[in-house]
Image: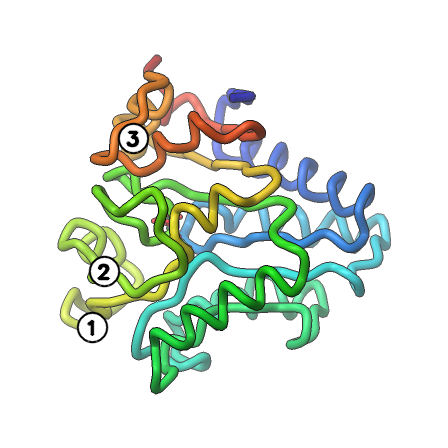
């Protein structure tokens, strides 16, 4: 694993943005796997600024997101579609044909999961997957003890994840109980992965990852078996 240590969140975001920018520059048809949450916001902001400053052409990239809440439609303020619209699609002028997120309102959710896998394959697989990490070591919404061979699937969110995400809603009751997420094997098929970890709340999960041991209780530890992972971590998230 390639590890980039930074002193703070802003530098972490800058390093991640430069990495994504350079990958798009060298592969204008890049398939970018995107994450939501607080951690990548700074990265997206810096990426947008850099793309605008340097006039990078993004008309041939595709993006695919890790996950979406079940039951929230695209225009719900806390849907991941809406998050992506605000943080990336609108500022980068990406069209609907370039941007894929699972549909959490699909009538047949199992079918939506299969279609999502097919969509990823159809566009050539993920070249660069951006990941955040949960306090409990989840990646995407793959909670502890999710099968490492899982494909895109429906998950019941743990109480700890719902509590952590309640900050985005007016109260915990509004946090959906289920989500669609890429599976761990879907994520592991990405050609390269960048994991962003910031803040002391992530230190325990980062510590498990850096132990080098693969432990189903801490899903991110499977990344130790991927040949091309870069961890960008700030001081607060790194004890080891
Ligand atoms: C988001 C996602 C999650 C988050 C994780 C960390 O699409 O899949 O795994 O990356 O919950 O969230 P933040 O960055 O808000 O701490």
- The answer to the question of whether label 1 and label 2 lie on touching residues, with beta carbons closer than 8 A, is yes
On the image, the x and y values in percent for residue 153 come to: 34, 62
* Above or below 31: residue 10: above
In this picture, residue 67 sits left or right of residue 144: right
Number of labels in the image equals 3
Query: Image point 44% across, 69% down: which residue?
Result: 114
Residue underneath mark 3: 205
* Above or below 28: residue 225: above
Residue underneath mark 2: 166
- Disc 1 C-beta below 8 A from ligand 1: no
Earlier sequence position, callout 1 versus callout 3: 1
On the image, the x and y values in percent for residue 152 come to: 40, 60
Label 2 neighbour load within 10 Å: few <14, some 14-19, many 20+: some
Residue underneath mark 1: 174
On the image, the x and y values in percent for residue 199 come to: 36, 33
Query: Image point 54% across, 37% down: which residue?
Result: 194
**Which of the two marks, 1 or 3, is nearer to us in this view?**
3
């Amino acid at each position: 694993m390639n590890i980039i240590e930074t002193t703070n969140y802003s530098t972490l975001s800058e390093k991640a943005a430069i990495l994504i920018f350079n990958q798009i520059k060298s592969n204008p048809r890049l398939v970018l796997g995107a994450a939501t949450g607080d951690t990548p916001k700074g990265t997206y902001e810096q990426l947008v600024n850099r793309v605008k400053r340097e006039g990078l052409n993004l008309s041939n990239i595709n993006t695919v997101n890790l996950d979406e809440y079940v039951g929230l439609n695209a225009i719900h303020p806390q849907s991941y579609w809406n998050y992506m619209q605000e943080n990336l699609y609108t500022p980068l002028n990406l069209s609907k044909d370039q941007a894929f997120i699972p549909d959490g309102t699909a009538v047949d959710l199992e079918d939506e999961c299969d279609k999502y896998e097919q969509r990823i394959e159809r566009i050539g697989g993920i070249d660069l997957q951006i990941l955040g990490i949960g306090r409990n070591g989840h990646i995407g919404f793959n909670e502890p003890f999710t099968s490492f061979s899982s494909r895109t699937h429906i998950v019941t969110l743990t109480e700890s994840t719902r509590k952590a995400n309640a900050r985005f809603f007016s109260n915990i009751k509004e946090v959906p109980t289920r989500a669609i997420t890429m599976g761990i094997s879907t994520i592991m098929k990405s050609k390269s992965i960048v994991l962003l970890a910031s803040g002391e709340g992530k230190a325990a999960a980062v510590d498990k990852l850096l132990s080098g041991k693969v432990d189903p209780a801490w899903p991110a530890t499977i990344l130790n078996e991927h040949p091309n992972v870069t961890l960008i971590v700030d001081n607060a998230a790194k004890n080891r």
